[in-house]
Amino acid sequence: MKEILLIGFYQPNEELNRFLSSAQQEFKIPVRYLQEYAALGTGGGIYHFRDQILSGSPQQFFVLNADVCSEFPLEDMLRFQKEHGDAHSFIILATTANRKQSLNYGCIVENEHTSEVLHYVEKPSTFVSDIINCGIYLFTPEIFQHIGAVFRKNQQDVMLDEQCNGWQRAEVIRLEQDIFTALAAQEKLYVYKTDRFWSQIKSAGSAIYASRLYLNQYHKTHPERLATNKDGGPKIIGNVYVHPTANIDPTAVLGPNVSIGTGVTIGAGVRVRESIILHGATLQDHSCVLNSIIGWDSTIGKWARVEGTPSDPNPNDPYAKIDSETLFRDGKLTPSITILGCNVTIPSEVIILNSIVLPHKDLNRSFKNQIIL
Ligand SMILES: Nc1nc2c(ncn2[C@@H]2O[C@H](COP(=O)(O)OP(=O)(O)O[C@H]3O[C@H](CO)[C@@H](O)[C@H](O)[C@@H]3O)[C@@H](O)[C@H]2O)c(=O)[nH]1
C-alpha cells in the first residue's frame, strides 16, 4: 500500500487536518484529503480525481465506502482477483443478508461457478438476491474508461437539455447504478464473498455495535490491545479497550464492549457497559453508563444513570444486519442508545434515558426519550 486518499465534499477543518497528520505519523503512509467542489457521487468523485489516483501508476487500487466497518479482507480480494477473471477484472466484496434486509443494499446475482456478477440492482424494491454489496471494491485503472464513457454520455444528454446547468450534472456519477449495473455480465465484474464481520455504520447506535465487532476482532488477533484484570486496576468483564492515559478507579467495573478514550477520568464505584466514552470525559463516583456514547469532555455527576436501549441485529439470525432506522417511527422517537454531545454536563443523581443531548448542554434534571437541543 502506497497512499491513502480520502475523497469527500466537506470543507476540511482543523480537526480533520489534525487527524490526517496523526494518521500519517502513526501508519507511516501519506494520507491526503481531496475535496470535491460538490457532491459528485462515488463514481464521479474518483473520476474527478483520477489523475491524483493514477499518479505513481498503480496497477490496482481499493475504493472503500467510509461508513462501513469490516475486517477488510483486502489481501484475500487481491488473491481472488489473481485466481478469477483476468488481471483487469474488478472485484466487489459481498456478504450474505437475510431476504428482508437485502432490499436496503446493492444486490448481486452471480455465476456460482465463475463468481462473475451477472446482475446488479441497487436497493431493489422486491427480492433479487441475498448477496449484498459491502461497499469495498478492488479496481484497476481501466475503471476510469467505464466511468469516462458514462461522463461523456451525461455531457451529451446535458447539451441536448438546454435548461439544465451543464457540468455539474454530467459529473455526478454513482458507481452502483451507473457503472456496476452496466458492467454486469460483461466478464469484467466479479464478486468475492466474505463471512467475516461487516456492518454499515449509518446511525450512532451502530457505532456501539461496530465497536463490539472490532473489540471481538482484537480479542482474536490483537489481545494485547484489550484491558485485563490486574491488581490495583478496575474489574474488567469481556472485551474492553482503555487508552493508557485514562485514569480509572480500581473499584470501577467496565465491560463488556466498552471503549475508553484519551484522558478519561472514571471515579469510584462507576459501572460502564456497552458504551463508548470519548476523550476528556469524566464519570464521577458511582455513576452508571449503559448503552451510551459519552461525548468529548462531558461530565456525569455522582450517582447519575445514563442509559440507552441497544438496537442490535437479531442474534438468532446469522445473516441479520443492524437496522439503520430513522430516529422517529410513527411520529415518536424510537428508543435507542443515549448520546451525549461534547461538553455536556449531567448533574448528580439524575437519570438520562434513551435521549440525544446536543453539545455544550448543562442539564438540571432527569430526561427520558428526548432530543435535548
Ligand atoms: N466522495 C463522495 N462520497 C460519497 C458521495 N456520495 C456518497 N458518498 C460516500 O459513499 C458511501 C456510500 O454512499 P451512500 O450513498 O450512503 O450509499 P449507501 O446507502 O451506504 O449504500 C452503499 O453502501 C452499501 C454498503 O454499505 C451497499 O450495499 C450499496 O450498494 C451502496 O454501495 C458513503 O461512504 C458516502 O459517504 C459523494 O458525492 N462524494
Image (cartoon, rainbow, N blue to C red):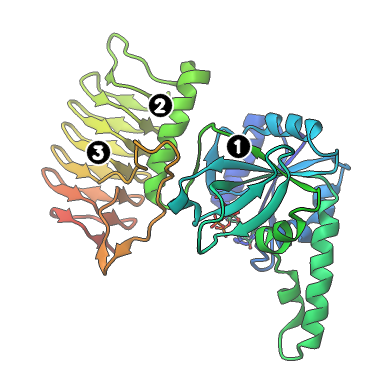
x and y percentages locating residue 24 in the rendered image? 66, 36
Disc 1 vs disc 2: Cβ atoms closer than 8 Å? Answer: no
Please give the name of the residue rendered at 19% of the width and 26% of the height, measured from the top-left corner: 268
Residue 227 visible in the displayed image? yes
Q: Which type of secondary structure does the marked residue at label 2 adopt?
A: strand
In the picture shown, does residue 35 fall above or below 199? below
Closer to the chain start, of discs 2 and 3, is: 2
Residue closest to the eye, 319 or 55: 319
x and y percentages locating residue 282 in the rendered image? 28, 37
In the picture shown, does residue 127 fall above or below 241? below
Residue closest to the eye, 139 or 108: 108
Q: What numbered label is drawn on residue 183?
A: none
Q: Amino acid at mark 2?
A: Tyr
Please give the name of the residue rendered at 15% of the width and 37% of the height, measured from the top-left corner: 302
Residue found farthest to the right: 57
Please give the name of the residue rendered at 39% of the width and 26% of the height, measured from the top-left corner: 242
Mark 1 or mark 2, which is nearer to you? 2
Residue closest to the eye, 370 or 82: 82
* Other-residue count near label 2 (Cα within 10 Å), few / some / many at <14 / 14–19 / ≥20: many
Which residue bears the numbered disc 1? Answer: 22
Q: Is residue 88 left or right of residue 68?
A: right
Q: Is residue 120 left or right of residue 246?
A: right
Residue found farthest to the bottom: 163
Closer to the chain start, of discs 3 and 1, is: 1
Which residue bears the numbered disc 2? Answer: 241
